[in-house]
Every structure is written in C-alpha cells, then in structure tokens.
Image (cartoon, rainbow, N blue to C red):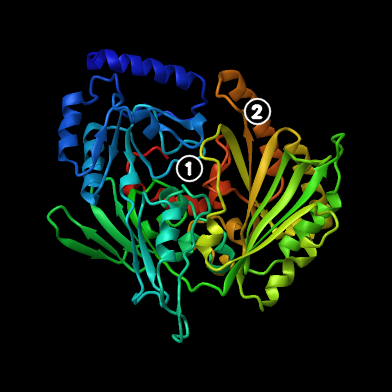
C-alpha cells in the first residue's frame, strides 16, 4: 500500500481535476481541509473511528467512491473522510470532532440535493444511510390516526412499505384499515433535506406539506447537544444525561422549511399518519407538442389541460411533465403529459373532474388505474438514479392559468425552453397546503398558494468543462424565461446561480432575518 501522504496527493490531484471542471460557487476558507497543517492525521481519524458504533470510511476504502456520489453526478465532491453513524451518540461524536478541529462538516441522507449543498471536497461527511429505522405508533395522543417515527437515512419507499403493513381502526372505529403518510415520490429520497425544505408530495394537496405533518424531530446542534423539538417545547439532553425544558421552539420552526442541514443534524422525524381512501385512482394522459417538421401543435390543448389541472379539487395530486421526448410509432415529438392520482372513492364527485382531459381529442394515449393502497400506486413512480443536470424551479400560481394572456405566454415559454433540450416536471401544489397560516413555517407562501412547483432541467451525457458550460448557459436562459411566471422557488430544487435566492426561497426579508437569527444552533455544514 502506498504511504498515506502519497495516496492523499493522488486523491487530491483527482479532486483538483474534478473541481476544475465544475462550477463551485461557495468556498469555505476558514475551515481546515486535507493538506492543511492543522488537518488531523490518519491516526487521529482512526482513533475516532474506534469510538463509533457505526463506521469510518477513508478514501482508500473500496466503497468510498460509491459513498461519495450524488445523484446529480456533476455535483459529486470528494470528502476527506466519511462517517456512517449508527446512533445519536455517533452523530454527537462527529459534530464535536468537526468543531474541535474546525473541519467542514457535511450531512447527506440520500444525495438528492441537486446543487451539491450536502457535499464538499475535503469535508468530514456524515452519511446517514445506516440510521434508517421506521417505527409506527397507532396509539398516539397527538394524532388520532397515529404517527410514524423515521430516522433520517430511511428512504420514502422504505417508509411506505412499513406503513403499508399497518392495520388499525378506521376513523369511525367500525372497521380495520391501513394508514398513509405524506412523503416524496422518488424511491431513493430520504427524510433529511426533503423535510427541511418543505416537502411536497403526491398526496400533499390533500394533507399539506411534509412540514405541516411533522410532529417532532430530534436534532444534534453545533454544541453536540441533543434536542427533541416540537411545536410546544424543546427538550435538551445534556452530556450528563440531564434534561432541560424550554418553551423556545425556534429550532422546530426553522427545521420546517428553513433549509436542509442548516440548523443541526436531524437524526429522526415523527410524522402524522392519515386514514387512507377507499382506493387510489391514477391517470395518465399524453398530448403531443410538435409535428414531424418540428412545428408546434396543440398549444390550445395544452392550455385546456392546464385549465383542468388548475380547477382540480385537493383530492387530486401528482405531476405534469413537458419535454421534447420522441414518441415511438408516431409522427410527433415532444409531449405534455399528466400523471395524477385521486385520493377518494369511486363515488366521489371529484373523481370525474379529470374526465374532460382524458376525453380531450388531442390526447393520443391514456391510462386509468385503480390501486387499493398508496404503496401499490407509489411503486410505479420510478426516477432515474443518476444524471448530469442543471435544474431551476418556479412556483406557478393559479393566476398564471386563469389569465388568458399569461396562460398563452406561459405555454409559449414552455414550448421554447423544451426546444433547447430542457425538460420540466411540475408537482401539483396548493389545495389544502394553503390551510397552514402564513408564517407558521418558513416555507415560501408561493409553495402553498400555487398550482405547480415547476422544476426544469438541462441534462447532458458526460461531465466535461465544455459540456458543463454549454449546459449551464442553456439552462440559465431557460430559468430566466420561467422566472417571469410564478412566485418564488422551491428550496429543494433551485438553480445554483440565483442572486435573489433569499426572496425566491422565503419571500421576504423578515423570514430570512428570523432564520439568520438561529445561527447559534448551526453546525458547520455544506448548506
């Protein structure tokens, strides 16, 4: 084996080469990184590794590169060391170690941070995947349907699978039924950044955002102390095991939309459970956008479809996709498609709200399915595991659709940007999300009042300097076009280059100022 210093120089060469091909908007000059005289030596790192219930992974571990990947490969960075904690005490040890040595601590629960805020070259990385327990409690005094406690590293598919096993009394207490929980659609997304960014969901229009359903969280702050936080109190566990109670709920407020990994390391979340419907109905409808000559068609049909979507009751949730995809066995290219689910019963009047879209003459393909449980629906919602992408997002408001002039302009803009190789996936928002009072969470009010959180992205097949620059420039042009519509951006799917990010994330200076006032809790994270 090569000496540590030589191996590290080889690794640093790779880091330098990789970093040169990527845009890195943030630097942290006050932190200590590999190569600095103050950076702990390998013996010191191995010493802390022996204290862990979990694992310490060095760059020489064959699993290191796989553990370093982000799902958006172009934001992958190479940490100095990786800790895979198994217990809350492991998280405390890592936080205190990073604090003592002035290391840059980054936290990653699933790697779906599109712009790389959970990674940094040379950081001490907390990879939370080993903390993945899911515990369901039906006899909850806080919520009649029960609650589920989820460690940060668990994926939403894992949570849905465990919740799907639950059977208990229905709301009336007359029969036995299952439960559902508000969560993300992508199978590999975990709790951490998803929840702390707000958390929209296929059933969010029915039950609100993930943060509206958060009952409690356990968080380790920069001083290494463990806090159990909820809407009424904060319980702090000191190092001697003593408990301290406070009515200060600032951490809980900040965690509910203030941004992932900013206020501490959240080790678990407790969410409300809900009673399920009689069945889930899932529909797909596809409208082509261009003819064989590349001429735009069906713009009126797209407007008709958006009007239908804009009028849907909260029972409906899901996604609208628009992209320049080829249509097999068809003279058309480009598609506008809706992939929506209905939370209700066969007799629900809201179930028929989608019929005029399904029966639209411009729809060339459709599907209509009925599933007995949310898990049966969710297993069909697969996302690409890895990609090279630059994304941007705008929270489209209902007024964009109800005003005929802005609707026409919006549809024209969507056609324009997808002709440049950009695809968009819009998550339906609004509905009952708006029932939570403005200011009760840091979440941008546009995420509650809107109709779609429209996320668009430019993908290219290989990360290189030239390809990255061209892709980013193309995406930014599309972003500025999309920003003329909507109100704010979803913090979990932002562009990397957003000079007005404070207002696009949180709408006003007061919310940002209140969040900034929580710096006393912050760990030195990569966000």
Q: Is residue 130 left or right of residue 18?
A: left
Q: Which quadrant of the structure image shows residue 420?
A: top right
User: What is the quadrant of residue 418 in the picture?
Assistant: top right
Say the numbered circle drawn on residue 300: none
- Can you tell which mark lies on residue 112? 1
Seen from the viewer's position, the closer of residues 505 and 49 is: 49
Q: Position of residue 494 (x, y in %)?
A: 56, 42
Q: Residue furthest front?
A: 329
Give the x, y percent position of residue 175: 46, 83
At horizontal 52% and vertical 66% (from top left) the residue drawn is: 373
In the image, taking residue 218 as reference, residue 158 lies left or right, namely: right
Count of picture labels: 2
Q: Hey, which quadrant is residue 465 in on the image? A: top right
Q: Residues within 10 Å of mark 2 (few under 14, many from 20)?
A: some
199 displayed left or right of 140: right
Callout 1 crowding tier (Cα within 10 Å): few <14, some 14–19, many ≥20? many
- Percent coordinates x, y for residue 64 in the rendering: 34, 30
Location of mark 2 (residue): 473
């Amino acid at each position: 084996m090569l000496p540590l210093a030589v191996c590290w120089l080889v690794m640093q060469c790779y880091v330098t080469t990789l970093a040169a091909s990527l845009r890195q908007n943030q630097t942290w000059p006050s932190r200590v990184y590999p190569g600095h005289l103050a950076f702990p030596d390998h013996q010191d790192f191995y010493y802390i590794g022996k204290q862990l219930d979990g694992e310490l992974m060095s760059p020489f571990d064959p699993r290191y590169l796989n553990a370093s990947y982000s799902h958006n490969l172009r934001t992958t960075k190479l940490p100095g060391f990786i800790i895979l904690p198994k217990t809350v005490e492991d998280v405390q040890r890592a936080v205190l170690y990073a604090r003592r040595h002035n290391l840059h601590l980054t936290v990653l629960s699933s790697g779906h941070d599109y712009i790389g805020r959970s990674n940094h070259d040379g950081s001490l990385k907390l990879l939370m995947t080993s903390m993945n327990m899911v515990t369901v409690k039906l006899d909850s005094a806080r919520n009649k349907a029960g609650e589920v406690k989820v460690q940060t590293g668990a994926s939403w598919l894992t949570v849905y699978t465990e919740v799907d096993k639950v059977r208990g009394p229905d709301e009336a207490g007359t029969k036995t039924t299952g439960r559902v929980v508000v969560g993300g659609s992508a199978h590999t997304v975990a709790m951490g950044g998803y929840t702390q960014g707000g958390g929209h969901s296929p059933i969010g229009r029915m039950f609100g955002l993930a943060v509206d359903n958060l009952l409690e969280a356990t968080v380790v702050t920069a001083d290494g102390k463990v806090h159990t936080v909820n809407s009424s109190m904060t319980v702090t566990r000191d190092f001697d095991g003593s408990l301290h109670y406070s009515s200060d709920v600032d951490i809980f407020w900040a965690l509910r939309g203030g941004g992932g990994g900013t206020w501490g390391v959240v080790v678990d979340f407790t969410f409300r459970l809900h009673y399920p419907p009689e069945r889930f109905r899932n529909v797909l409808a596809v409208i082509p956008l261009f003819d064989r000559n590349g001429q735009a068609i069906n713009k009126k049909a797209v407007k008709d479809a958006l009007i239908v979507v804009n009028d849907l009751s909260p029972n409906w949730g899901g996604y609208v996709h628009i992209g320049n995809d080829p249509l097999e066995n068809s003279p058309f290219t480009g598609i506008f498609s809706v992939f929506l689910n209905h939370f209700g019963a066969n007799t629900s009047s809201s179930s028929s709200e989608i019929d005029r879209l399904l029966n639209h003459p411009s729809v060339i393909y459709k599907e209509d399915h009925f599933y007995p449980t949310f898990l049966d629906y969710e297993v069909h919602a697969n996302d690409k595991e890895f990609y090279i992408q630059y994304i941007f997002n705008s929270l489209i408001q209902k007024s964009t659709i109800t005003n005929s002039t802005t609707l026409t302009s919006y549809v024209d803009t969507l056609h324009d940007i997808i002709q440049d190789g950009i695809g968009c996936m819009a998550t339906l928002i609004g509905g009952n999300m708006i029932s939570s009072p403005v200011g009760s969470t840091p979440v941008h009010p546009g995420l509650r009042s809107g109709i779609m959180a429209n996320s668009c992205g430019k993908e290219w097949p290989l990360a290189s300097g030239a390809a990255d620059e061209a892709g980013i420039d193309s995406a930014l042009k599309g972003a500025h076009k999309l920003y003329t519509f909507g109100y704010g951006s979803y913090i979990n799917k932002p562009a990397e280059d957003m000079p007005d990010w404070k207002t696009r994330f949180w709408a006003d200076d007061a919310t940002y100022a209140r969040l900034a006032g929580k710096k006393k809790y912050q760990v030195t994270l990569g966000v």
